Image (cartoon, grey):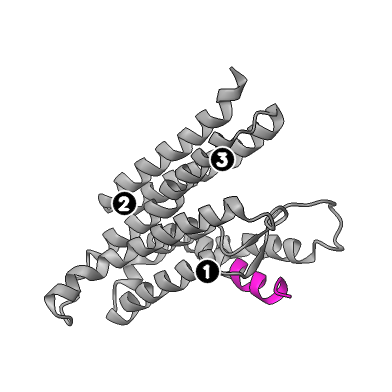
Amino acid sequence: MKKHIPNTITSLNLISGCIATYWAFQSNYELALLFIVIGAVFDFFDGMSARLLHVSSPIGKELDSLADDITFGFAPSAIIFSWLCGYDFHELPSPIAFIMPFLAFIMAAFSALRLAKFNLDERQAMGFIGLPTPANALFWGSLIVGGGEFLASSPLYIYGVIIMVLVFSYLLISEIPMFALKFKTWGWKGNEVKYIFLLTCIPLLMILGVSGLAAIIAWYVLLSACTQRH
């Protein structure tokens, strides 16, 4: 019986992603973000339960990647797509204007590519190479929830979001080393970057609210790029 527990938790992650996608298409970005967060919680516990119960399996690994692409790839892409559909792109020719919101799904494809790469990359035991898909999903969900109205106020910001989709798609498969919040020891030495990151998260959330989560992910990427590349 215990061998089915991790896969059940992974399936709950996938279901959370499906529900998040539904709410994204309904333009209820708050609930979409909530179910992405719920999916992230399940994603954390499925791997932990597999290790604790000693029931890791190849099918679990494949199921985990599939669930992650739905929750952390397709769901945030659906949020961006739905949000972009609220802008008519009247300054562009009709065929191009129609295509613009669909550019959001480029990120879903790059998320799948990142997950496939992660499964084969043995360098990512204590850190990441490229932006993890959960971090990417939390960035976009919190950005649209916390700053969507502001970003929709100007065509400049709208096109800026589209450019950011392309940038973050690249970050997903980039060779930029990014730290993971895994500790071999709890001392300051050797964990300076992790502690600095954690200490800045609380004030960002307190000052910026939901948008603070997007700021935290952006800070994570910047801090990783500045300190982990060698």
* First of labels 1, 2 by sequence position: 2
* Residue at the limit of the structure toward the top, as seen here: 1
Q: Residue 72: horizontal and vertical position, in percent?
A: 46, 52
Residue with the mark numbered 1: 171
Residue at point 70% right, 74% down? 229
Residue type at mark 1? Leu
Image x and y of residue 3, in percent: 60, 23
Q: Position of residue 107 (x, y in %)?
A: 40, 62
Q: Using the image, determine if residue 154 lies above or below residue 46.
A: below
Can you identify the residue that label 3 sits on?
Answer: 61
Circles 3 and 1: CB atoms closer than 8 Å: no
Around disc 1, counting alpha carbons within 10 Å, would you say few (fewer than 14), some (14 to 19), or many (20 or more)?
A: many
Q: Residue at point 33% right, 47% down?
A: 21
- Mark 3 crowdedness (10 Å alpha carbons): few <14, some 14-19, many ≥20: some
Residue annotated with mark 2 = 24
Location of residue 227 by image quarter: bottom right
Instruction: From the top left corner, tell me how far across and down residue 17 is, in percent.
Output: 41, 44
